[in-house]
Image: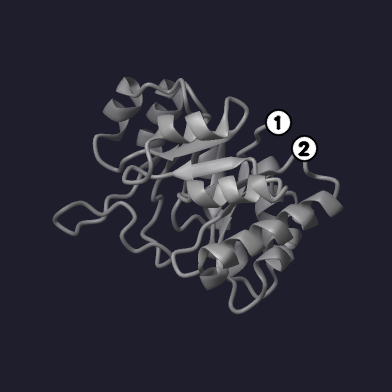
Amino acid sequence: MTLDISKYLVVGRENTCGRPVWQIVKMAVQAGFTCVQIRSKTASAKEIIQDCRECAQVINELNKSNEVTLLVDDRLDIVLACREMGIKVDGIHIGQSDIPVWVCRKYLGKDAIIGLSAPTHNLIKYIEETDVSEIDYFGAGPFHPTNTKPDCGMDETGRVTTRTVTELKELAKKSPVPVVVGGGVKLNDLNALKQTGVAGFFVVSAVAGAEEPYEEAKKLVEEWDS
């Protein structure tokens, strides 16, 4: 499995305007997306497992199983269940308040992909001081305030901090592992993001909530790759 976080889709049932998750994932992968994270705060474990099964199947049907990474947000139990059921899930993405990285590594093994959301505050200091031996990439954001995750970047006072281009440049330079950036990212942000040296961008609603997901995904892929 080659990890490519350059074009990264985060999606769950609450993001798709009533369409099946696998349908959105299929269009994104056909358009050139390289990483998919299944993230839902409303679906049951059984429903997320079903989404993982269907998404793994469409990725396999597109002959992309070795190129497109399929991850689950937060739920180590679901990743382990999928593996027991023969569903190809490549790893997990965890946040600061989720299961510790070392526990995920212990249960998923050395070949699993583990991504970690870097905290919004003291970001550069955190990246400089964190032991990255157990993780494969950092997620950072938000680039803009986002309705998909309104508390993204929020501090204890309720103020939302967004990431600046200058900060992301420093982050990309100092991080020992690749960095993917998201949070309200749109097509016209990609040129500026690419100039920072980060490894990629992630989106939710820009593809999952679009009227024509394939067309929107294709535009994002072409813009990033150009």
Q: CA distance from mark 1 to mark 2?
A: 7 Å
Task: Read off the residue under disc 1.
Answer: 2
Helix, strand or loop for disc 1? loop
Type of residue at label 1? Thr
Q: Quadrant of residue 16?
A: bottom right
Is any atom of residue 100 visible in this view?
yes
Helix, strand or loop for disc 2? loop
- Quadrant that contains the C terminus: top right
Q: What residue is shown at x 27% (from left), y 26% (from top)?
A: 125
Q: Would residue 14 appear left or right of 23 to someone viewing this image?
A: left
Q: Position of residue 36 (x, y in %)?
A: 63, 50
Q: What residue is shown at x 51% (from left), y 67% (from top)?
A: 44
CB within 8 Å, label 1 to label 2 = yes
Q: Is residue 123 above or below residue 218?
A: above
Query: Of all residues shown, which one is farthest toward the bottom?
Result: 18
Q: Position of residue 145 (x, y in %)?
A: 36, 59
Q: Mark 1 vs mark 2: which is more N-terminal?
A: 1
Q: What residue is shown at x 64% (from left), y 40% (from top)?
A: 90
Query: Of all residues shown, which one is farthest toward the left?
Result: 157
Q: Nearer the viewer, residue 209 or 100?
A: 100
Query: Of all residues shown, which one is farthest toward the front?
Result: 84
**Number of numbered discs present?**
2
Q: Quadrant of residue 151?
A: bottom left
Q: Position of residue 197 (x, y in %)?
A: 52, 30
- Quadrant that contains the N terminus: top right
Q: Quadrant of residue 19?
A: bottom right
Type of residue at label 2? Asn
Task: Read off the residue under disc 2.
Answer: 66
